Image (cartoon, coloured by chain):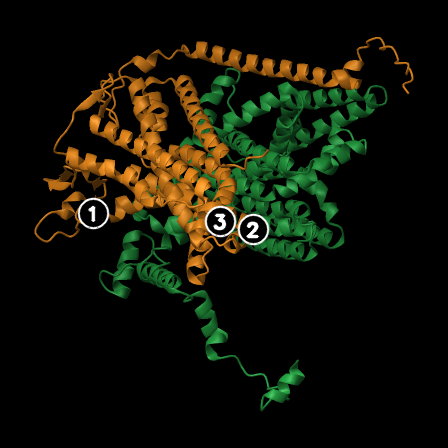
Amino acid sequence: MSDTHAQTVPFVRDTMLPAAPPPDRQAGAVRWLRENLFSGPVNTVLTILGALIVWFLFVTFWDWFAHSVWNASSLSECREIIAATWGEGARGACFAVIRERWNQYIFGFYPPDLYWRPTMTFGLLMVALAPVLFGASLLIRRVVLAVTAVVTLGAMIVLGVPAGWLAFTALVLGFGLYASERNIAWLLPFSVIYPLLGVWFLWGGTLWGPIFVLVAPVLGWLAWRLLAGRAPMLGAVAAGVVTVLFWLFLAGDAASDAQGLIPLAIEPVRSDRFGGFLLSLTIGVAGIALSLPLGIVLALARQSDMFLIKSLAVIFIEFIRGVPLIALLFVASLLLNYFLPPGTSFDIILRVIIMVTIFAAAYMAEVIRGGLAALPKGQYEAADALGLDYWKAQRLIVLPQALKISIPGIVSTFIGMFKDTTLVTFVGLYDPLKSMSDAVRANIAWKGIYWEPFIFVGAIFFLICFGMSRYSMYLERRLQRDHR
Amino acid sequence: MMTDVSVPANPPFRLSMLIHDRRYRSLTFQVIVFILVMALFWWLINNTLQNLALLGKSFDFGFLFQRAGYDIPQTPIPYTADDTHLRAAVVGLLNTLIVAVLGCISATILGVIVGVARLSKNWLFARLMTVFVEIFRNMPLLLWILIVFAIFTEILPPPNAYRGEDPAWSMILFDNVALTNRYTSIPTLGMTNDPGSLDLGARITFNWATIAFVVALLGGWFARRAIRSRAQAVQDRTGDRPATWWKTLAVMVLPSLFLIWYFGLHLVPPSLQGFNFSGGLNVANGLVALWLALTLYTAAFIAEIVRAGILAVSRGQSEAAFALGLRPNRTMSLVILPQALRVIIPPLISQYLNLTKNSSLAIAVGYMDLRGTLGGTTLNQTGRELEAIVLMMLTYLALSLIISAGMNVFNASVKLKER
């Protein structure tokens, strides 16, 4: 075809032209601008609108930030400094309140000479979490543990830790780093006992308490071993009964007796001294750790074939989900004493943790139920075909896949719960957001300071929650097994 | 060919079969759980009775019919301190509903706008919306309520800043709305031709004009449905769809316009009388702050839901619609939206529920909602924690169940009709 064509037209180019650069408007920044900001009238209007919004925010807040004062002892001093530096009538932020009172926002009314204890607790938390959260990637583990070690030890030295405890922390962190290089599973025993250790570090008192709490399951295990050969079911029941009875009736007395014989105690700290982010993190971490297993159990119960189990789970979940968290917190603070035997009263933080846990667990159960429902029926049938019993099928086939599907929902439940820890302010605990800011403002020096504490506390919440949501995205990518 | 398989005779029942035989095991397990749950309830109720006896209290709801003796700043139905605690609780419930309904409407509007804008091809605008969503989703709602409330109480001026020849502040929106540090003054509706009110008893009244508008809107809606189904019938018969937009517009708008003219409806803007605004409606800043904060916070979540819903409709759907020759707006309304709604509605329901429950954070701004009246002042005055909190929780529960039931009906109407 081209041959005939070539004979009818006077000229046909027979060499390739050299590649020419694209026109200016089709390359580089100009093209990007045309495609992304000014591709049509609507887009142009939107761009101008967006630029106006940015400009408005900048004009409103820039000078306020630029004029911030970090060194002052009261709000009026701040204002004087701003007026002296930037002229009368200038606006400026007074972040000096954070510099003066950061310790209250972080630790509440925890004794200042013991600030190292919460620091150590949350530093070691990262070691305990490493095998659970960062089990797969050596690089991430290395970075997280190294940063944790440096920050924790540095902060503890600044906060004035006794040499023995510093050595202990360094030892555990060092072991964490070593185990992370060699075999991360070595850390699992530490992860198991960490909750008790953490409670002991934070609240203090005698070490015998946690020890005897640990002794109970060991005794239960012994009972099971004794009976397992003859009657496995009886053995399991006996193990449970022994453990619970020991916790209920023996652990307390045994701990105080042992304390009398061999004193092993650190300074106790009462619950009303907790506050700020220490309180939020304590409630948040405990709630997260407890609500996930409870949520799984509830979700499985709701999917169960047994009518009674299913209806109990439905009633529980729908009741908890239908009621605001504040109402449950009021139950914790006002009504729980009615429901317990006369004369019992237990710790308000523990009560709040219980309520926050069951609240989050009900939501968690619905999220996980979604995951269970999304799993193809073939997976259940395959597990049955392999002859697995119910628990084996759930543990090996169903739950690993269902939990993977529900990761985004689970993490957003965690985030929601962590944000909701601020509501404890309404039952008289010192959350960082309201009670602590009110307490700071109650001092005449800081009367009328609103925005700086909000920004400080909000920024920390943002970092933690945003970090959690990014982690869930990482986890989703890591666990992705299909190829799309 | 069938052979006679000798079925083993049922083995004699042994106690261990309760555990080892799958026929009995689930029954055994359920009986054990039932006994344990009953024992737990018995224990809880027994403890409660003992504690009540020790405190010399009883469990009865008689206090609801006693004089409340406290004032509520904002009352949708007439209420004075001489009314009963029950009426105070109803006022609280209505206040909860007011902020919940307002919040749901505005959060949906804002959320849809933000969610769509986040998908916009405009780089700057999409980034801005992302920042909005991430900021509001990752900080506690309480923080936003406190910030908005602090803006109202700390930055806005007292009413007398609007006084004088050359006032420091002036009213916004064509002299209709005055923002002050105690309340936001908005216009009320006035009528030159007031038809009087329908008395429902218990001092609850509905103006006939309100009822007329509701009837007109409902009638318009049904008329619109009739018009559309007739248009559909014509289209099915002839292949041409008659233009319906002007008929729809007429039946939806004209009756209301007529009623506005007939009743002489007009805005009565607030005006400064002495130290305060009067004439308009002075909405307490607690309500405004709570509503704004709930709107912004929930809108961020709804934006994500809307975005996910639109992304869930595969590109092939819109391409197929274009290939069939549908115009972009018909593509949106006939192809994309029905499919996106299916994904959007269920999580949207739970956001509405969350918003309703989160409205109990009114405690932070002193807005008297259900928790503020029944679970707050009434509880403190009568000292009946048990009854007040149980009643409050049951009310919230009923509210949640009603909302989710209503929304599920709506969901059933949009979801995929499977055959």
Q: Is residue B210 above or below residue B171?
A: above
**From the viewer's perspective, is the residue at label 3 or at label 2 nearer?**
2
Chain letter belonging to callout 2 = B
Left-right relation of A178 to A70: right
* Pick the front one: A425 or A295: A295
Query: Which residue is disc 3 drawn over?
Result: B307
Specify the amino acid type for callout 1.
Pro
Q: Sequence order check: which comes first, mark 3 or mark 2?
A: 3
The reply to whether residue A430 is in sight is no
Percent position (x, y) of residue B381? 31, 20
Tell me the SS state at disc 2. loop
The span from disc 3 to disc 2 (Cα, nearest Å) is 13 Å
Residue extending furthest toward the front: B238
Question: Which image quadrant is residue B149 in?
Answer: top left
Specify the amino acid type for callout 2.
Ser
Tell me the SS state at disc 1. loop
* Pick the front one: B42 or B267: B267
| Number of other residues with Cα within 10 Å of mark 2, as a class: few under 14, some 14 to 19, many 20 or more | few
Q: Are marks 2 and 1 on the same chain?
A: yes
Q: Which residue is drawn at 51% across and 40% down?
A: B342
The span from disc 3 to disc 1 (Cα, nearest Å) is 39 Å
Percent position (x, y) of residue B172? 20, 49
Question: Which image quadrant is residue B378 in?
Answer: top left
Indicate the colour of chain B. orange
